[in-house]
């Protein structure tokens, strides 16, 4: 494992569990099945950046809105 990837994992390990899971899912999607690398489009990169910025700013959908979309 490279030093850069080790540093990234170290930093991610300090984040809350939900953020770690989010980043783990992203990494698995980027790598794809069987370790093949697939690139994100510029639009996907912009969407991820925007989502992370909103999360950092504390902008989340309300619990009520989520319940409306995903009733139990």
Image (cartoon, rainbow, N blue to C red):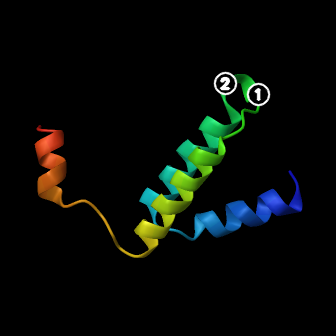
Where 31 falls versus 65 (above or below)? Answer: above
Q: Marks 1/2: CA distance?
A: 6 Å
- For the C terminus, the image quarter is top left
Q: Secondary structure at mark 1?
A: loop
What residue would you read off at disc 1? Answer: 36
Mark 2, residue position: 33
Around disc 1, counting alpha carbons within 10 Å, would you say few (fewer than 14), some (14 to 19), or many (20 or more)? Answer: few
Residue drawn at point x = 51 percent, y = 52 percent: 47
- On the picture, is 9 further left or further right than 2? left
Hey, which residue is sitting farthest front in the picture? 43
Q: How would you rate the neighbour count of disc 2 (Cα within 10 Å): few for under 14, some for 14-19, many for 20 or more?
A: few
Compare residues 51 and 32 and report the one nearer the observer: 51
Q: Residue pushed farthest bottom? A: 57
Give percent across and percent down for residue 28. 62, 38
Q: Which residue: 52% across, 68% down?
A: 15
**Farthest top residue in view:** 34
Closer to us: 42 or 35? 42
The residue under the point 57% across, 45% down is 44
How far across and how far down the image is residue 1, in percent? Answer: 86, 51
- Quarter of image, res 46: bottom right
- Secondary structure category for the residue under label 2: helix
Above or below: residue 21 compared with residue 62: above
Place residue 58 in its image quadrant.
bottom left
Estimate the x, y position of residue 9 in percent, counting from the top left: 69, 60
How many labels, in total? 2
Q: Nearer the viewer, residue 56 or 21?
A: 56
The reply, left or right, for residue 17 in relation to residue 46 is left
Tags 1 and 2 touching, CB below 8 Å? yes
Which residue lies most toward the right here? 2
> Which residue is nearer to you in this view: 24 or 65?
65
Residue drawn at 49 percent across, 51 percent down: 21
Q: Is residue 44 above or below residue 57?
A: above
């Amino acid at each position: 494992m490279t030093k850069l990837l080790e540093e990234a994992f170290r930093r991610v390990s300090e984040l809350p569990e939900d953020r770690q899971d989010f980043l783990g899912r992203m990494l698995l999607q980027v790598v794809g099945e069987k370790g093949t690398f697939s690139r994100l489009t510029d639009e996907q990169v912009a969407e991820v950046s925007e989502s992370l910025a909103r999360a950092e700013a504390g902008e989340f959908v309300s619990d009520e809105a989520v319940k409306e979309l995903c009733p139990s």
